[in-house]
Amino acid sequence: MKIKYKQLKPYLLLWSTQSFSALGSSMTSYALVLWLYLQTGSALKTALLSVCSYAPYVIMSIFAGALSDKWNKKYTMLACDLMAAVTTVIIFILIRTDSLCEWHLYFLNALNGLMNTVQQPASEVAATLLIPKEYYQKTSGLRSFSQSLNTILVPVLATVLFSFEGVWIVIVFDLVTFIVAFLSLSLFIHIPENRHTNYMDETLLASAGKGIAWLKQNPLVFTLIMFLACINFVASAYDAVLPAMLLPKYNGDSMVLGMVNTCAGIATLMGSILVTVLPAPGNRIKAICIALMISMSTENFLLAFGKTPAIWCIGAVSGWLPVPFMNANMDVVFRSTIPPEMQGRVYSCRNTFQFFTIPAGFLAGGFFADKVFVPLMERQTADSLLLLFFGTGKGAGAAMFFSVLGVAGTIVCIVFSLVLRKYQWNGTD
């Protein structure tokens, strides 16, 4: 299919500038995780950063989509981005005055999460309104491309800047990326509004109820959402524990952590390129299940039993290479199945159901690493088989927890693959 770039020009400008802004935001988040872990040495305390970000997102998402369907998409995105930038400026001031505390980060992350709650469904619908239907898979590949490129660049750039100048210089870069994205959206991008206005007078409860009702009538989409909810639990526990495994093994050296995260980004980038150029699979549901099975059944075990950075990097590649294939096929199924005038409400319900497991996963990962597996490994004697499998030191407990995550993720994929067999998707690309 020949791509007509003129049709995609508004979306490409939005995608590129928002991706640049996301790079800055992710670098700040990464640097703050490093700062807090090196300050406290606690996986649970660093995991709470993500819990505070996702908690308001999960709680309020079901209503945010109703607002997104009613409000102007462009102004909603601009207002949310501006408020998020304000929280970043506050962190910058606290850093420069040597006043930053743990509770500041938790509070400001929660406020940021609240802004993202409204901004995310608005941006999802904006993308649908800007993209011709025949380009859904191609543009999904572009989104995966930018996300994976950011995954590559974030640990490298954030670690270098953090090592030489500290958190404040990372925040300055974040604010520059915000200005570029904000001006581009406000001055150069027109986002059309839905022509369907029969829902404008609905109450928030009624709008949210319609989103839930739509999901009840479409069990395939709801089952996919619950599949991702279980995967998100495992993946967020992974995110919570990874620094707790790698940093202690190298005396707090963030370069190894950055190396593994960079390999994950390179793998995702490769997968994004492939999914953009390859033809559509014959069975999108089966493609989603296979991609997640490969991801869940490889990376966690290689992290658990591997003893060198090379093995951990191979694990990162095997775990993240299939992710763009899953994302692209999931995106096509959702955008092709959910009517545009319902997408804000349905996506917000999806966010609540699919992402409520993320803060739970971060809490579980931090708790079990700090309170269960690290003490368990510290009690082992020199002749213990567990020491042979997972090594010694504080990072050994986190390594053991990765083996548990590998088993859990594989079971989730097997169960949902069996459940999804009974559904047929009749959408078009």
Image (cartoon, rainbow, N blue to C red):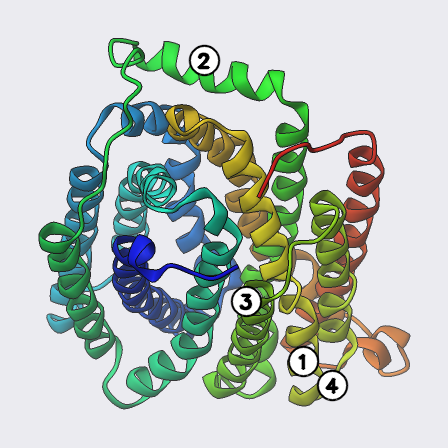
Q: Which mark is residue 312?
A: 1
In the rendered view, tell whether residue 249 sits above or below residue 208: below
Amino acid tagged 2: Gly
Q: Earlier in the sequence, mark 1 or mark 2?
A: 2
Cα distance in 3D space between marks 3 and 4: 29 Å
Side (left or right) of 320 relative to 138:
right
Q: Earlier in the sequence, mark 3 or mark 2?
A: 2
Secondary structure beneath dot 3 equals: helix
Secondary structure state at the residue bearing disc 2: helix
- Residue at image position (25%, 14%) is 200
Above or below 262: residue 87: above
What's the amino acid at mark 1? Answer: Trp
The image position of residue 167, as x and y in percent, is: 26, 75
Of badges 2 and 4, the one in the foreground is 2
The answer to whether marks 2 and 4 mark residues whose Cβ atoms lie closer than 8 Å is no
Identify the residue at image location x=48%, y=81%. Answer: 258
Q: Looking at numbered disc 3 in the image, what kind of residue is underneath it?
A: Ser
Provide the residue designation for mark 3. 272
Above/below status of 315 relative to 281: below
Secondary structure found at label 4:
loop
Residue at the location (19% across, 32% down)? 72
Circle on res. 307? 4
Answer with mark 3 or mark 4, whichever residue precedes in sequence. 3
